[in-house]
Image (cartoon, rainbow, N blue to C red):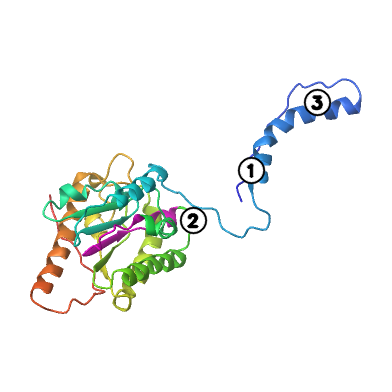
């Protein structure tokens, strides 16, 4: 439940004259303005509600306008079937998918600050009218930043991937592993736990797990700051170039397998990168 931190400080040199009743009135006049925000919050809450507050741990982009834009785009969507759908949070939102994959039709459905539950909540409004040929998902990082446990995040991610598989039984679906970053390096053990759980379920869930985090580590095993922007969270062009190579390679392998008439089986194997700029 939202709370308000009221710091009364020290009242120095306040001399209250008159009766005790006047003192109480003076104290009330001082304290009530401080309590007003808390009272307003309390009046807006539903008694007995057990629903946890929604988490928006990455406030770089407000996503309400983006969701509305997606819904409007879907009304006039002329995208041909067979496009590549990119779905998730701000790491997708900031990715110039059209420019990065000019030989493929792409749809970017990323919105900043998104948690996995946000994606599930707006799920229907995010999907294009034409079925995509491939779907790439990056989400879960903001969940952990907002305080969710690795187990809960993995559960929600797998629920999202299961829903995508049910809606697109013939599509190639890949989950992009949670990435390390300088500003969220302390969360890396939890991210690794989510990655491990999701990767272990990839074959059963009929999706691929694509390791895109290892490519962002320097030789000392720490996040390579040169691949990130000033905020230490979102990648710069050099960082995205590494993701481009990994994703393009994955798409090529899937297309070659399909062209050869092979059965494309989702794999739990971890695709590591050995890339240089």
Vertical placement of 108 versus 263: above or below? Answer: above
Question: Mark 3–mark 2 contact, CB under 8 Å?
Answer: no
* Quadrant of res 248: bottom left
**Quick check: 119 left or right of 262?**
right
The residue nearer to you, when weighing 63 against 29, is 63
Dot placed on the residue nearer the N-terminal end, 3 or 1: 3
Tell me how far mark 3 sits from mark 2, CA to CA. 41 Å
* Quadrant of res 80: bottom left
**Quick check: 113 left or right of 9?**
left
Q: Which mark is residue 26?
A: 3
For the point 31% across and 57% down, the residue is: 87
* Count of marks overlaid on the render: 3
Indicate the secondary structure of the residue bearing disc 1.
helix
For the point 8% across and 76% down, the residue is: 260
Q: Mark 2 — residue?
A: 147
Residue 155, given in percent of the width and then of the height, sits at 43, 68
Indicate the secondary structure of the residue bearing disc 2.
loop
Q: Residues within 10 Å of mark 1 (few under 14, many from 20)?
A: few
Residue 232, given in percent of the width and then of the height, sits at 32, 44
**Quick check: 53 left or right of 139?**
right
Tell me how far mark 3 sits from mark 1, CA to CA. 25 Å
Residue 270 is one of the magenta-drawn residues: no
Residue 142 is one of the magenta-drawn residues: yes
Question: Mark 3–mark 1 contact, CB under 8 Å?
Answer: no
Dot placed on the residue nearer the N-terminal end, 3 or 2: 3
Q: Mark 1 — residue?
A: 41
For the point 64% across and 49% down, the residue is: 45
Which region shows up in magenta?
A: 126-145
């Amino acid at each position: 439940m939202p709370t308000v931190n009221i710091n009364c400080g020290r009242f120095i040199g306040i001399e209250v004259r008159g009766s005790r009743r006047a003192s109480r009135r003076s104290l009330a006049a001082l304290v009530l303005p401080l309590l007003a925000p808390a009272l307003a919050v309390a009046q807006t809450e539903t008694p007995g509600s057990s629903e946890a507050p929604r988490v928006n741990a990455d406030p770089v982009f407000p996503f309400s306008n983006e969701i509305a834009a997606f819904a409007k785009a879907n009304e006039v969507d002329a995208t041909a079937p067979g496009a590549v759908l990119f779905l998730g949070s701000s790491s997708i939102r900031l990715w110039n998918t059209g420019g990065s994959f000019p030989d493929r039709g792409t749809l970017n459905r990323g919105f900043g600050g998104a948690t996995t539950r946000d994606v599930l909540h707006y799920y229907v409004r995010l999907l294009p009218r034409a079925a995509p040929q491939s779907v790439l998902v990056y989400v879960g990082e903001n969940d952990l930043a907002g305080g969710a446990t690795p187990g809960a995040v993995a559960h929600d991610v797998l629920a999202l991937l299961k829903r995508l598989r049910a809606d697109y039984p013939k599509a190639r679906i890949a989950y992009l592993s949670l990435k390390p970053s300088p500003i969220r390096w302390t969360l890396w053990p939890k991210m690794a736990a989510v990655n491990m759980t999701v990767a272990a379920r990839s074959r059963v869930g009929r999706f691929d797990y694509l390791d895109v985090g290892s490519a962002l580590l320097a030789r000392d095993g720490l996040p390579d700051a040169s691949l990130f922007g000033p905020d230490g969270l979102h990648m710069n062009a050099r960082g995205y170039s590494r993701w481009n190579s990994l994703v393009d390679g994955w798409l090529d392998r899937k297309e070659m397998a399909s062209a050869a008439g092979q059965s494309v089986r989702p794999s739990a194997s971890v695709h590591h990168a050995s890339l240089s700029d």
